Amino acid sequence: MSKNRTISTFSQKPVSGKPGNRHNSTFGVVAARTALALLFGAGLFLSVTPAGRATARTAFLVAAVISASQPAPLNLLEEPVRHIQKTVPSRGGTVYLDIYEPATPAPPLSRALEGIVIIPGVGDNRNVPQLINLSLALAHVGIVVEDITTSTLIHNDISAVDSDAVVQAFNFLSHWPGVGADRIGIGGFSGGGTLAYLAAADTRIRDRISFIVLFGAYFNAETVLRAYGQRAIIVDGQLVPWYPSQYPLQVLANVMADGLPPHDGSLLVSAFIPGGKPLTSDKLAQMSPPAIAAYHLLEGDEPGRVHENMAALSPQLHALLNTLSPSSVINKVHAPIYLLHSRDDSSLPITESQAFAAALARIHRPYDFVEFGIFQHVEVATGHSLTQILGDALTLFRVLYKVLLPGS
């Protein structure tokens, strides 16, 4: 009772005759009304307008990606997500699909849900925590995600025929309940970027793709091989030391083995599998000149002979590398392209995305190219300063906002 009386007394206290008090009271009322109006307007903007919905969805996604976990706002929303596994056939064999979709219907003001086909790189990445987190976060904000892989990718290899797997997955998603057929993009991580771009050039789907996101991808397989052979990249006209991690060497050995006689291919692969050892002179003597050249380029033990070793590759190997290069179909893609790359990428050098961007600029194709410092290849790394994190977060926000706006 005393508390109520105190409030009542305070609220009913006669106002002093001083003009300042009457001014302060009026100002307080106006400020409160203004704050309420701003809050109402912000809420309306974020929930109703396309730009507002895109802003809110992008903020949630950036928080999820940067923290490599579900951000608190998404957890509080408790938006249910369904995870469904499917398979579809393709020219290269079975395509394995992991679909993450929001369990609630599309918002009333949205014609349909946005969808994205993600090729998360070479290997079996279906249980990688950061991929699962990204897929859940995308589904939480109303996007149907379709992560795909194939037997070839699972076996640490890349084949151009698997671009058909992406086409089949795209068509499958375009018929998924609630998904707008005109609101589907493709995302390719690392070596998956090659398949994403080859599929985007396919006349069966290229005019129906909303966007393409390539993260940590390469532009030309031969320039990648040159960088591996030199153990260096060209930065601002200068040759700078660069050392690849082991896994991409294993993948490229598998790729090149597909273009070599079985015996040569087997010896080449044996040197770059986990625990593999450099080939002895006796084993090299058993190999053909193209296979020997491929070995030295991957091993990086003849940096001064990169030009000669590239020339020693067989026409079959050159053709194989060309079919696995986005550069071979650079002018056949119609969708807007977003190139993302880590500055210190030890799997595929950032010079690949720089060359990609320069080629797109020359042919006047719409694209956006951004560099990051907080990623190592395509995963968030630790130990970065707050300034670096915030800077990359703003850059990531800008790109994701553009991707999400059409579906908002």
Image: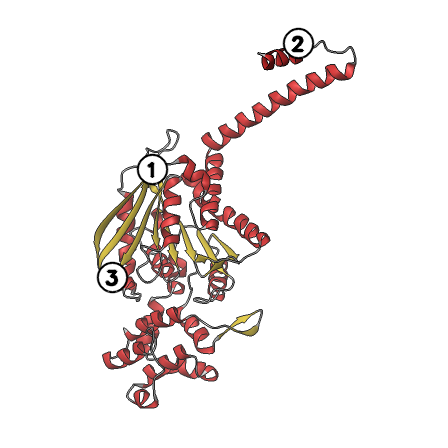
Residue 116: x, y in percent?
35, 47
Residue 378: x, y in percent?
43, 58
Give neighbour class at mark 2: few <14, some 14-19, many 20+ (Cα, 10 Å): few
x 30%, y 87%: residue = 283
Q: Nearer the viewer, mark 2 or mark 3?
A: 2
Residue type, mark 3 in image: Ser
Compared across the picture, whether 170 is left or right of 367 comes to left
Pick the quarter of the image with the C terminus: top left
Spatial separation of the CA atoms under disc 2 and disc 1: 50 Å
Q: In this rendering, does residue 210 appear at all?
A: no
Spatial separation of the CA atoms under disc 2 and disc 3: 78 Å
Q: Which of marks 3 and 1 is in front?
A: 1
Pointer 2: what residue? 12
Pointer 3: what residue? 151
Residue type, mark 2 in image: Gln
- Which residue is most to the front? 2
Residue 275: x, y in percent?
34, 75
Residue type, mark 1 in image: Pro
* SS for callout 3: helix
Pointer 1: what residue? 80
* SS for callout 1: loop
First along the sequence among labels 3 and 1? 1
Q: In this view, does 360 lie above or below 232?
A: above
The scheme the figure's colours follow is secondary structure
